[in-house]
Image: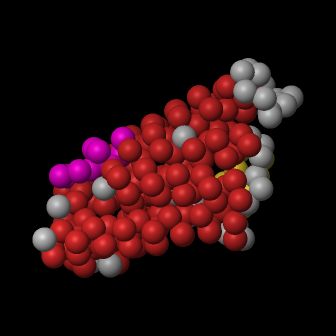
Amino acid sequence: MFIIKQTNTLKLTITALLMAIAITIPMVMPVRVVIPPMSFTLASHVPIFFAMFLSPYIAVLVSLGSTVGFLLAGLPIVITIRALSHVVFALVGALYLAGRREEILSSPVKSQIFSFWIGLVHALAEVVVVSLFFLGILSGGDYSESFFYVVFLLVGVGTLVHSMVDFFIAQVIWKSLGKRMNRIAKKVTA
């Protein structure tokens, strides 16, 4: 019984810390490029990837926390809803990593393939969101540029690159913490 409570406390603490970081990054990060409907906030996905390395449950909650951060940062609604779409790639990625985390994260080739694959899922979810605004299905976006430029280049390709950069940062941090994180991850997923 004590072990279960200790694990739940650990899971709650890690989730709360990652959510706090995910909320704070869009509000204070000095490196931010905004080209509506696109925004590039360096490291904004790092807490989500870190959570993804731990569990689907934590990944979803941290993604929701990130959405709150973008909302509180006062960014346009299209950017906030794009942040909400992170739940999709976080859940898909965390489910895929469950049971394969060490194998994938320890292999440079497998981790880059995973990063590209999950970046495509990430980009696709954001492309769908921006398409809804671009086509007028959701209000709040008025774009004079072409659909191809806004949706596919800015959002699609931009998100893929941004996702892969943030995945790399998260992986470097994860590896720098070494075996400690693997032990914590085993406790959290148990």
Q: Position of residue 87 (x, y in %)?
A: 47, 44
Q: Position of residue 134 (x, y in %)?
A: 74, 26
Outermost residue toward the front?
1
Please tell me whether residue 96 belongs to the stretch shown in magenta: yes
Q: Is residue 155 above or below residue 165?
A: above
Please tell me whether residue 120 belongs to the stretch shown in magenta: no
Q: Is residue 160 above or below residue 174?
A: above
Residue at (76, 22) in percent of width and height: 136
Q: Position of residue 50 (x, y in %)?
A: 40, 63
Rendered image quadrant of residue 143: top right
Rendered image quadrant of residue 173: bottom left
Q: Is residue 119 at all visible to an observer of this figure?
A: no
**139 sits to left or right of 129:** right
Q: Quadrant of the C terminus?
A: bottom left
Rendered image quadrant of residue 95: top left
Residue at (47, 58) in percent of width and height: 62
Q: Is residue 2 at all visible to an observer of this figure?
A: yes
Residue at (30, 73) in percent of width and height: 10
Q: Position of residue 4 (x, y in %)?
A: 18, 68
**165 sits to left or right of 30:** left
Picture colour scheme:
secondary structure
**75 sits to left or right of 46:** right
Q: Quadrant of the N terminus?
A: bottom left
Label count reads: 0
Residue at (59, 64) in percent of width and height: 23
Q: Which residues are magenta?
A: 92-100
Magenta part mainly helix, strand or loop? helix
Q: Is residue 14 above or below residue 140?
A: below
